[in-house]
Image: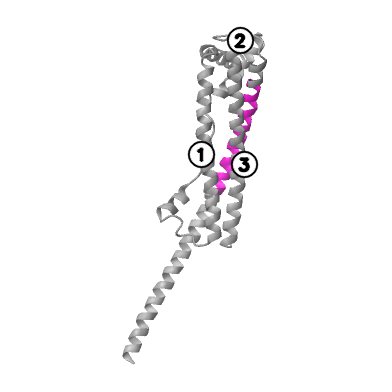
Amino acid sequence: IEFLMLFLAVFLGFLADNLRESFLEKSKEEKYVRSLIEDIKTDQKILQAVIASNKKKKVLLDSLTQLCFKHTAQKDQTNAMYHYLPIVLEHPEFFIPNELTILQLKNAGGLRLIHKQEAVEAIFNYELKKKLLEDQSVYYQNYQTTTINLGLKIFDLSQLRDMMTTVQQNGKSPQSMSFITEDKGKLTEFANLTSMYSGIISYYIFLLIETDKEAASLIASLQMAYELN
């Protein structure tokens, strides 16, 4: 009887430890999931801002492209092209996700703490979308560099600087803008580059929108899987 009582005490203690560990792990899992949802909601706000910024950039870039294709050496056209040139020079606005929670999960052993398979799959799909965006942003930036390098052979940046200063001071653009070269071939090549650059931005916007949809889907999946409000 003493042996059975001792065995039962050890067994119940072991069982209690397992139950306590399981409860703590579930509590930690839910804490990570709630934190992940908040990170994704932040991502959605960033995505919306980046989508709006890139849509605006594409419209201005398309205007510059059309001017380049139709350029006939008229001063007003040249002035307008200088007006749109900064959109090529400015650094693109890329999506930088909030990855605090996902990094904590990875450091804790991958997604080991997430036990629900549907949640793991939803997280994987979202991570894949983010990876596609990251890859496209590299291509995006490389194409911008190529476009700028050719633009430096056509546009005089000292005139651009003077133009921007004059606009800030007087609210009007100078009327004597000119190119380094009037070579029609270079202008056409530049127009081809800006047209391709616009297409790359279009695809980046498409990926941003798809990532935003995946973010909403992930939030819904996590809330359903863990019965969260």
Q: Which residue is mark 3?
A: 209
Q: Which residue is mark 1?
A: 134
* Cα gap from disc 1 to disc 3, whole angstroms: 14 Å
* Tag in front: 2 or 1: 1
User: Circle 1 sits in a helix, a strand or a loop, which is it?
Assistant: helix
User: Start and end of the magenta stretch?
Assistant: 40-64
Residue 174: which disc? 2
Q: Is residue 39 left or right of residue 176?
A: left
67 up-or-down from 73: above or below: below
Q: Residue at x 51, y 23 (%)?
A: 146
Q: Which mark is residue 113?
A: none
The kind of residue on which mark 2 rests is: Pro
Which x, y percent locates residue 88?
A: 56, 23
* Cα gap from disc 2 to disc 3, whole angstroms: 40 Å
Kindly state the secondary structure of the residue where label 2 is placed.
loop
Q: Residue at x 39, y 73 (%)?
A: 17
Quarter holding the C terminus?
bottom right
Dominant secondary structure (helix, strand or loop) of the stretch shown in magenta: helix
Question: Residue 86's spot in the image, x, y percent?
Answer: 56, 21
Indicate the amino acid at tag 1.
Glu
Outermost residue toward the front in this view: 185
